[in-house]
Image (cartoon, rainbow, N blue to C red):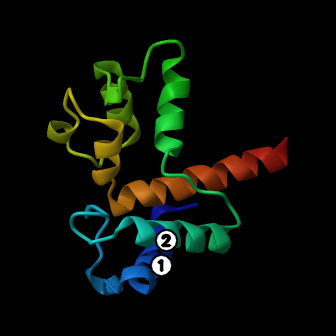
Amino acid sequence: MELADVFEHVKTVIENSNGTPRDSIRLEQTLFDELGVDSIDLVDILFELEFLYKIQLKISDIESRARAKMGDEPYEIDGHITPAGLQVIGEFMPEISKDKLVEGLTVHQLVQLFTVESLCKIVIYRIEEEERKKEN
């Protein structure tokens, strides 16, 4: 699945959810701060993408992948992402500026940094996961 294809669908879903014109939506925009997506919009967006692609989506997929890659090393302590956790998040989400992935960042604050591209990548990850399950 190509990012450009998913991006086209994501733009339509965001427009339908919160009214942002699809032609003004860019990959690098943050969902919450720049596009004005709120928690109810996000639930709607995820539901629509799940229906469209026949997958289950969770914003926590990035965190789950990071935890899996880190093994026994802690991803977060007391709600704050560890330096090692920040490094892994940076690898999975290079679209987020390194100056925002700083010590003290909480798990909840990380979600605020998600961009349209981050959402597209979660969709692609889930599609690929489903394809791998079907192959096995």
Name the residue tied to disc 2: 45
Give the vertical position of 33 relative to 75 (above or below): below
Which residue is rendered at x = 35% and y = 87% of the image? 19
Quadrant where the N terminus is found in the figure: bottom right
Which three-letter amino acid code belongs to the residue tagged 1? Val
Which residue is rendered at x = 50% and y = 76% of the image? 9
Question: At which x and y percent is residue 28?
Answer: 26, 61
Which one is earlier in the sequence, the residue at label 1 or at label 2? 1
Question: At which x and y percent is residue 135?
Answer: 83, 46
Question: At which x and y percent is residue 131?
Answer: 74, 52
From the viewer's perspective, is 120 left or right of 99?
right
User: What distance separates the C-alpha of mark 1 from that of mark 2?
Assistant: 6 Å
Name the residue tied to disc 1: 13
Are the residues at dot 1 and dot 2 in contact (C-beta closer than 8 Å)? yes
Give the vertical position of 34 relative to 80 (above or below): below
Which residue is rendered at x = 33% and y = 70% of the image? 37
From the viewer's perspective, is 46 left or right of 102?
right
Whether residue 94 can be seen here: no
Residue 124 appears in which quarter of the rendering?
Answer: bottom right
Quadrant where the C terminus is found in the figure: top right
Q: Residue reaching furthest front?
A: 78
Residue 27 appears in which quarter of the rendering?
Answer: bottom left
Which three-letter amino acid code belongs to the residue tagged 2? Ile
Along the line of sight, which residue is nearer the eye, 2 or 109? 109
State the SS at label 1: helix
Whether residue 46 can be seen here: yes
From the viewer's perspective, is 132 left or right of 3?
right
Along the line of sight, which residue is nearer the eye, 83 or 53? 83
